[in-house]
Image (spheres, rainbow, N blue to C red):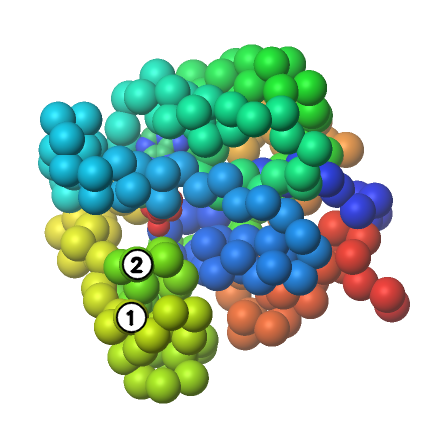
Amino acid sequence: MIAISSPKHLVVFGRPGSGKSSLAERIGTDHGFRMVRTGELLRTAIRKGDALGAEVESILASGNLVPDLMVFELLERDLKAPVNEKLLFDGFPRTFSQIPLMERLEKRMGFRVDCFLEIAVSPEEALARMTARRVCPHCGATYHLKNKPPKVEGVCDHDGERLTTRKDDNPEVIAVRQGVYDEHMSPVLNHYQTNAPERFRRVNGEQSFDEVYAETEHVLGFSKT
Ligand code: ADP
Protein backbone atom coordinates (compact mmCIF):
# COMPACT_ATOMS: atom_id res chain seq x y z
CA MET A 1 0.00 0.00 0.00
CA ILE A 2 1.39 3.43 -0.91
CA ALA A 3 1.99 5.54 2.18
CA ILE A 4 0.37 8.94 2.53
CA SER A 5 3.14 11.47 2.85
CA SER A 6 3.10 12.66 6.50
CA PRO A 7 -0.48 13.99 6.66
CA LYS A 8 -1.24 17.21 8.49
CA HIS A 9 -5.00 16.74 8.64
CA LEU A 10 -6.19 13.30 9.45
CA VAL A 11 -9.56 11.64 10.08
CA VAL A 12 -9.68 8.33 11.95
CA PHE A 13 -12.67 5.98 11.59
CA GLY A 14 -13.37 2.81 13.51
CA ARG A 15 -16.34 1.13 15.13
CA PRO A 16 -16.84 1.48 18.89
CA GLY A 17 -14.31 -0.92 20.39
CA SER A 18 -11.91 -0.78 17.40
CA GLY A 19 -9.25 0.97 19.47
CA LYS A 20 -9.64 4.08 17.31
CA SER A 21 -9.44 6.58 20.16
CA SER A 22 -6.38 5.02 21.86
CA LEU A 23 -4.65 4.87 18.51
CA ALA A 24 -5.57 8.46 17.68
CA GLU A 25 -4.32 9.58 21.08
CA ARG A 26 -0.92 7.99 20.49
CA ILE A 27 -0.58 9.38 16.95
CA GLY A 28 -1.48 12.78 18.35
CA THR A 29 1.13 12.62 21.10
CA ASP A 30 3.93 11.16 18.98
CA HIS A 31 3.40 13.32 15.89
CA GLY A 32 2.13 16.60 17.32
CA PHE A 33 -1.52 16.59 16.26
CA ARG A 34 -4.18 18.53 18.06
CA MET A 35 -7.01 16.12 18.80
CA VAL A 36 -10.53 17.00 17.70
CA ARG A 37 -12.74 14.39 19.36
CA THR A 38 -16.47 14.93 18.94
CA GLY A 39 -17.33 12.30 21.59
CA GLU A 40 -15.14 14.20 24.05
CA LEU A 41 -16.62 17.59 23.05
CA LEU A 42 -20.06 16.10 23.74
CA ARG A 43 -19.01 14.69 27.10
CA THR A 44 -17.56 18.10 28.02
CA ALA A 45 -20.92 19.65 27.10
CA ILE A 46 -22.60 17.16 29.46
CA ARG A 47 -20.22 18.09 32.30
CA LYS A 48 -21.28 21.73 31.97
CA GLY A 49 -24.69 20.67 33.25
CA ASP A 50 -26.80 23.13 31.24
CA ALA A 51 -29.89 22.41 29.11
CA LEU A 52 -27.86 21.41 26.06
CA GLY A 53 -25.76 19.10 28.24
CA ALA A 54 -28.86 17.36 29.58
CA GLU A 55 -30.17 16.77 26.05
CA VAL A 56 -26.80 15.42 24.90
CA GLU A 57 -26.56 13.18 27.95
CA SER A 58 -29.83 11.38 27.25
CA ILE A 59 -28.87 10.84 23.58
CA LEU A 60 -25.45 9.39 24.47
CA ALA A 61 -26.94 7.18 27.17
CA SER A 62 -29.24 5.65 24.53
CA GLY A 63 -26.35 4.91 22.15
CA ASN A 64 -27.81 7.05 19.37
CA LEU A 65 -26.22 9.92 17.49
CA VAL A 66 -26.44 13.59 18.35
CA PRO A 67 -28.01 15.81 15.60
CA ASP A 68 -25.49 16.84 12.94
CA LEU A 69 -25.81 20.56 13.49
CA MET A 70 -25.32 20.27 17.23
CA VAL A 71 -22.03 18.45 16.65
CA PHE A 72 -21.01 20.94 13.97
CA GLU A 73 -21.62 23.89 16.29
CA LEU A 74 -19.49 22.35 19.03
CA LEU A 75 -16.75 21.69 16.47
CA GLU A 76 -16.81 25.23 15.15
CA ARG A 77 -16.59 26.61 18.66
CA ASP A 78 -13.64 24.35 19.42
CA LEU A 79 -11.79 25.30 16.25
CA LYS A 80 -12.56 29.01 16.40
CA ALA A 81 -9.02 30.32 16.47
CA PRO A 82 -7.21 30.12 13.12
CA VAL A 83 -5.58 26.72 13.15
CA ASN A 84 -2.03 26.33 11.96
CA GLU A 85 -1.80 23.15 13.97
CA LYS A 86 -1.98 19.66 12.61
CA LEU A 87 -5.48 18.29 13.31
CA LEU A 88 -6.62 14.77 14.01
CA PHE A 89 -10.38 14.22 13.82
CA ASP A 90 -11.76 11.36 15.89
CA GLY A 91 -15.52 10.84 15.50
CA PHE A 92 -16.32 13.21 12.64
CA PRO A 93 -17.78 12.82 10.04
CA ARG A 94 -19.97 10.06 11.42
CA THR A 95 -22.96 10.17 9.09
CA PHE A 96 -23.33 10.71 5.36
CA SER A 97 -24.88 14.11 5.99
CA GLN A 98 -21.80 15.17 7.98
CA ILE A 99 -19.58 14.80 4.89
CA PRO A 100 -20.61 18.21 3.46
CA LEU A 101 -20.24 19.69 6.97
CA MET A 102 -16.63 18.49 7.02
CA GLU A 103 -16.15 20.13 3.62
CA ARG A 104 -17.62 23.34 4.99
CA LEU A 105 -15.20 23.19 7.92
CA GLU A 106 -12.26 22.62 5.57
CA LYS A 107 -13.20 25.67 3.48
CA ARG A 108 -13.84 27.87 6.49
CA MET A 109 -10.65 26.89 8.29
CA GLY A 110 -8.51 26.66 5.15
CA PHE A 111 -7.28 23.07 5.32
CA ARG A 112 -7.81 19.84 3.42
CA VAL A 113 -7.93 16.38 5.00
CA ASP A 114 -4.92 14.44 3.67
CA CYS A 115 -6.00 11.04 4.90
CA PHE A 116 -9.16 9.18 5.95
CA LEU A 117 -7.99 6.18 7.93
CA GLU A 118 -10.19 3.24 8.86
CA ILE A 119 -9.22 0.91 11.71
CA ALA A 120 -11.01 -2.27 10.61
CA VAL A 121 -12.27 -4.62 13.31
CA SER A 122 -15.11 -7.18 13.21
CA PRO A 123 -18.23 -6.52 15.31
CA GLU A 124 -17.46 -9.63 17.43
CA GLU A 125 -13.93 -8.52 18.31
CA ALA A 126 -15.15 -4.98 19.04
CA LEU A 127 -17.78 -6.29 21.43
CA ALA A 128 -15.25 -8.38 23.36
CA ARG A 129 -12.96 -5.39 23.76
CA MET A 130 -15.56 -2.91 24.90
CA THR A 131 -16.41 -4.73 28.07
CA ALA A 132 -12.77 -4.28 29.18
CA ARG A 133 -12.60 -0.54 28.49
CA ARG A 134 -11.91 1.98 31.27
CA VAL A 135 -11.75 5.77 30.94
CA CYS A 136 -10.52 8.75 32.92
CA PRO A 137 -13.55 10.91 33.79
CA HIS A 138 -11.26 13.93 34.07
CA CYS A 139 -9.07 13.96 30.92
CA GLY A 140 -10.84 11.36 28.75
CA ALA A 141 -7.79 9.04 28.37
CA THR A 142 -8.86 5.49 27.56
CA TYR A 143 -7.41 2.21 28.82
CA HIS A 144 -8.04 -1.48 28.27
CA LEU A 145 -7.77 -3.92 31.18
CA LYS A 146 -5.72 -6.38 29.12
CA ASN A 147 -4.25 -4.61 26.08
CA LYS A 148 -3.51 -1.17 27.47
CA PRO A 149 -3.67 -1.19 31.27
CA PRO A 150 -2.77 1.93 33.27
CA LYS A 151 0.60 1.89 35.10
CA VAL A 152 -1.20 1.73 38.44
CA GLU A 153 -4.37 -0.36 38.51
CA GLY A 154 -7.54 1.72 38.38
CA VAL A 155 -5.75 5.07 38.18
CA CYS A 156 -5.15 7.45 35.21
CA ASP A 157 -1.47 7.73 34.13
CA HIS A 158 -1.90 11.41 33.28
CA ASP A 159 -3.65 12.91 36.29
CA GLY A 160 -4.06 10.20 38.94
CA GLU A 161 -7.87 10.26 38.67
CA ARG A 162 -9.83 7.02 39.45
CA LEU A 163 -10.80 5.26 36.22
CA THR A 164 -14.44 4.49 35.50
CA THR A 165 -16.54 2.65 32.92
CA ARG A 166 -18.31 4.79 30.34
CA LYS A 167 -22.09 4.94 30.84
CA ASP A 168 -22.65 3.89 27.24
CA ASP A 169 -20.40 0.81 27.62
CA ASN A 170 -23.15 -1.50 28.90
CA PRO A 171 -24.31 -4.49 26.78
CA GLU A 172 -27.64 -3.06 25.53
CA VAL A 173 -26.18 0.31 24.61
CA ILE A 174 -23.11 -1.34 23.04
CA ALA A 175 -25.42 -3.32 20.72
CA VAL A 176 -27.22 -0.12 19.68
CA ARG A 177 -23.92 1.68 19.04
CA GLN A 178 -22.63 -1.15 16.82
CA GLY A 179 -25.86 -1.07 14.80
CA VAL A 180 -25.74 2.71 14.51
CA TYR A 181 -22.11 2.53 13.35
CA ASP A 182 -22.86 0.01 10.59
CA GLU A 183 -25.92 1.89 9.41
CA HIS A 184 -24.35 5.36 9.33
CA MET A 185 -20.68 4.68 8.66
CA SER A 186 -20.96 2.20 5.77
CA PRO A 187 -22.07 4.97 3.37
CA VAL A 188 -19.36 7.31 4.72
CA LEU A 189 -16.59 4.74 4.25
CA ASN A 190 -17.93 3.86 0.78
CA HIS A 191 -17.98 7.51 -0.13
CA TYR A 192 -14.32 8.14 0.67
CA GLN A 193 -13.16 4.82 -0.69
CA THR A 194 -14.90 5.53 -3.99
CA ASN A 195 -14.41 9.27 -4.34
CA ALA A 196 -11.06 9.80 -2.64
CA PRO A 197 -9.19 6.47 -2.93
CA GLU A 198 -5.83 8.24 -2.95
CA ARG A 199 -6.61 9.62 0.52
CA PHE A 200 -8.39 6.58 1.95
CA ARG A 201 -6.44 3.91 3.86
CA ARG A 202 -7.48 0.89 5.93
CA VAL A 203 -5.42 -0.85 8.60
CA ASN A 204 -6.09 -4.20 10.23
CA GLY A 205 -7.28 -3.39 13.74
CA GLU A 206 -7.31 -7.04 14.85
CA GLN A 207 -3.70 -7.10 15.97
CA SER A 208 -2.03 -6.05 19.19
CA PHE A 209 -2.11 -2.32 19.91
CA ASP A 210 1.60 -1.96 19.02
CA GLU A 211 1.14 -3.81 15.72
CA VAL A 212 -1.84 -1.69 14.72
CA TYR A 213 0.16 1.38 15.64
CA ALA A 214 3.17 0.25 13.59
CA GLU A 215 0.95 -0.43 10.55
CA THR A 216 -0.69 2.96 10.99
CA GLU A 217 2.66 4.78 11.18
CA HIS A 218 3.74 2.95 8.03
CA VAL A 219 0.56 3.81 6.13
CA LEU A 220 0.85 7.45 7.14
CA GLY A 221 4.49 7.66 6.08
CA PHE A 222 5.65 8.30 9.66
CA SER A 223 7.80 5.21 10.10
CA LYS A 224 11.50 5.35 9.22
CA THR A 225 11.55 1.88 7.65
P1 ADP B 1 -17.36 5.56 20.16
O1 ADP B 1 -16.66 5.80 18.86
O2 ADP B 1 -16.72 4.49 20.96
O3 ADP B 1 -18.85 5.44 20.02
P2 ADP B 1 -17.16 8.41 20.79
O4 ADP B 1 -16.57 9.02 22.00
O5 ADP B 1 -16.53 8.73 19.46
O6 ADP B 1 -17.16 6.84 21.08
O7 ADP B 1 -18.72 8.80 20.71
C1 ADP B 1 -19.59 8.65 21.78
C2 ADP B 1 -21.01 9.09 21.40
O8 ADP B 1 -20.97 10.48 21.03
C3 ADP B 1 -21.59 8.39 20.18
O9 ADP B 1 -22.24 7.19 20.52
C4 ADP B 1 -22.58 9.45 19.68
O10 ADP B 1 -23.77 9.43 20.44
C5 ADP B 1 -21.88 10.74 19.97
N1 ADP B 1 -21.12 11.28 18.81
C6 ADP B 1 -19.76 11.36 18.68
N2 ADP B 1 -19.42 11.91 17.50
C7 ADP B 1 -20.58 12.18 16.85
C8 ADP B 1 -20.89 12.77 15.60
N3 ADP B 1 -19.94 13.17 14.73
N4 ADP B 1 -22.21 12.88 15.26
C9 ADP B 1 -23.18 12.50 16.10
N5 ADP B 1 -22.96 11.94 17.30
C10 ADP B 1 -21.67 11.79 17.69
**Quadrant of the rendered image containing residue 77:** top left
Tell which residue pokes out farthest to the right in this image.
Answer: 225
Tell which residue pokes out farthest to the bottom in this image.
Answer: 152
Q: Which of the labelled discs sits on residue 184, or is there none?
A: none
Nearest the viewer among 43 and 187 is: 43
Look at the numbered discs 2 and 1 and tell me whether their residues touch, using CB distance below 8 Å: yes
Residue at image mark 1: 161
Q: Amino acid at mark 1?
A: Glu
Give x and y (percent) for residue 67: 28, 21
Sequence order check: which comes first, mark 2 or mark 1? 2
Q: Quadrant of the C terminus?
A: bottom right
How crowded pointer 1 is (Cα within 10 Å; few <14, some 14-19, many 20+) is rated as some
For the point 78% across and 57% down, which residue is it?
A: 222
Q: Is residue 161 visible?
A: yes
For the point 36% across and 38% down, which residue is it?
A: 41
Give x and y (percent) for residue 81: 56, 26
Q: Is mark 1 within 8 Å of ligand 1?
A: no
Q: Amino acid at mark 2?
A: His
SS for callout 2? loop
Q: Is residue 185 visible?
A: no
Q: Is residue 141 left or right of residue 58?
A: right
Asked if 120 appears above or below 86 in the picture, the reply is: below
Nearest the viewer among 180 and 86 is: 86
Give x and y (percent) for residue 5: 83, 44
Q: Is residue 207 left or right of residue 55?
A: right
Q: CA distance from mark 2 to mark 1?
A: 7 Å
SS for callout 1? loop
Give x and y (percent) for residue 135: 31, 63
Residue at image mark 2: 138
For the point 30% across and 37% down, which residue is it?
A: 42
